[in-house]
């Protein structure tokens, strides 16, 4: 779904630089160009961007395997959070995954990432497990919650 100012698109190679900028500014770690290139080229991966007035303001990455997809990350540019764009990116992605006949969508999120947890639960993700000491933020180990959503 696109409205007059936002576009949801599959990413291409020209988007990688801006994706990395968003990640550097607003995420605890960063992957390199090769990582994103691989997501674009690999047919079992997914890399989509949300653009506002033609500029990338967020992206989502995932890996698929038959009926399952793992969301690796969903990041909205720090300047554009709290304006509904995370919802827009996630809801469009769920539609794309439905078209691809993906049934189970999994993701991990740090137990203290309350905004992401709230977003995922709003879209029907259910907690299925806890992964102890899964993330390391500034030398502190944080548990992750594993979520699953059945895309019906
Ligand atoms: C999580 C994230 C993607 C949300 O994007 P966003 O554009 O700010 O979210 P939206 O404005 O669309 O809000 C959607 C829902 O998210 C939740 N949410 C967003 N910001 C929140 C906040 N500050 N506190 C609590 N819940 C929040 C709410 O459930 C909200 O729904 P509501 O508006 O009906 O209350 C964004 O904060 C982000 O990029 N965080 C850093 C990266 C990250 O941690 N990603 C998740 C793990 S990969």
Image (cartoon, rainbow, N blue to C red):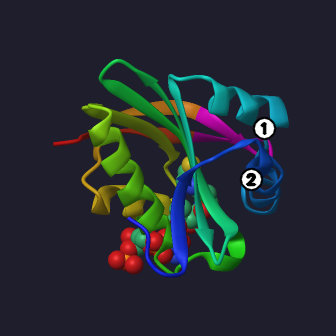
Q: Secondary structure at mark 2?
A: helix
Q: Is residue 91 found left or right of 139 in the rendered image?
A: left
Q: Nearer the viewer, mark 1 or mark 2?
A: 2
The image quarter in which residue 75 lies: bottom right
Q: Quadrant of the C terminus?
A: top left
Crowding near pointer 1: few (<14 within 10 Å), some, many (20+)?
A: few
**Residue name at image x 74 percent, y 32 percent:** 37
Q: Residue 44, how many percent across, how many down?
A: 50, 22
Q: Are marks 1 and 2 in contact (CB under 8 Å)?
A: no
Q: Main secondary structure of the magenta part?
A: strand
Q: Which mark is residue 131?
A: none
The image quarter in which residue 148 lies: top left
How many numbered marks, from 0 up? 2
Q: Secondary structure at mark 1?
A: loop
User: In the rendered structure, which segment of residues is drawn in magenta?
Assistant: 134-142
**Residue name at image x 70 percent, y 78 percent:** 79
Q: Is residue 112 magenta?
A: no
Cα separation, mark 1 vs mark 2, equals 10 Å
Q: Is residue 10 found left or right of 97 in the rendered image?
A: right
Q: Which mark is residue 31?
A: 1
Give the labeled residue for mark 2: 19
Q: Residue 10, how many percent across, how many down?
A: 56, 47
Where 12 falls versus 124 (above or below)? above
Q: Is residue 78 found left or right of 93 in the rendered image?
A: right
């Amino acid at each position: 779904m696109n409205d007059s100012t936002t576009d949801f698109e599959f990413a291409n190679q020209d988007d990688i630089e801006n994706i990395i900028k968003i990640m550097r500014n607003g995420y605890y770690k960063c992957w390199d160009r090769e990582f994103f290139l691989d997501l674009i080229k690999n047919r079992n991966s997914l890399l989509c961007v949300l653009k506002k007035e033609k500029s990338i303001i967020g992206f989502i990455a995932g890996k698929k395997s038959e009926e399952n997809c793992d969301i690796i990350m969903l990041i909205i540019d720090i300047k554009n959070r709290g304006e509904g764009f995370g919802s827009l990116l996630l809801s469009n992605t769920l539609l794309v995954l439905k078209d691809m006949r993906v049934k189970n969508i999994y993701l991990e999120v740090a137990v203290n990432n309350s905004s992401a947890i709230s977003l995922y639960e709003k879209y029907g993700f259910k907690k299925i497990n806890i992964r102890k000491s899964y993330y390391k933020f500034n030398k502190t180990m944080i548990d992750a919650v594993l979520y699953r959503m059945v895309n019906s």
